[in-house]
Image: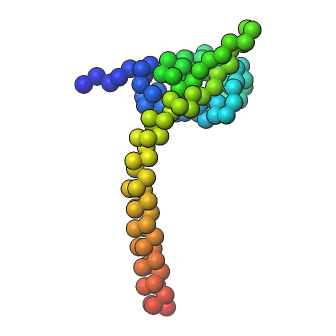
Amino acid sequence: MARTPTTFDPFNAISEPKRRELIEALVGKEMTVNQLVELMGWNQPMVSKHLGVLKRVGLVSERKEGRFRFYKVNAAQLKPIQEWVIQFEHYWSNSLDQLEDYLETLQSKEAKNE
């Protein structure tokens, strides 16, 4: 079965660590490519390439002002990813509770042996 092209799938798009870094850099603000180049320390073609993918899948939007293009995160487009991840919260909570119980048991045994 062929994978969905990254340019059409937000899950594949964010599987690239550099794209996740760009999303994190843009949370709550708009930035130009040049600002992102400076912040990230990457070259301009790399920033533009990753922004292009994020834009095609709808995770970032672009606003033109004069000769500048400003990019920002489309938080609503991240909702399906959050909804998918949140289903594992119960598992993580239970696992941490079990670990806490196990550690308490170990501590009790150590206290009895001292």
Residue in the image at 60% along x and 28% along y: 73
Q: Position of residue 1 (x, y in %)?
A: 24, 25
Quadrant in the rendering for residue 92: bottom left
Residue in the image at 56% along x and 32% along y: 75
Residue extending furthest toward the top:
67
Q: How is the image coloured?
A: rainbow
Residue extending furthest toward the right:
66
State whether residue 38 is above or below residue 99: above
Q: Position of residue 28 (x, y in %)?
A: 67, 34
Along the line of sight, which residue is nearer the eye, 114 or 56? 56
Residue extending furthest toward the front:
76
Quadrant in the rendering for residue 65: top right
Q: How many marks?
A: 0
* Left or right relative to 21: residue 111: left
Q: Position of residue 40 (x, y in %)?
A: 66, 29
Residue in the image at 50% along x and 33% along y: 78
**Camera sees residue 50:** no
* Left or right relative to 111: residue 95: left
Residue in the image at 46% along x and 77% along y: 104
Q: Position of residue 84 (x, y in %)?
A: 41, 41
**Camera sees residue 71:** yes
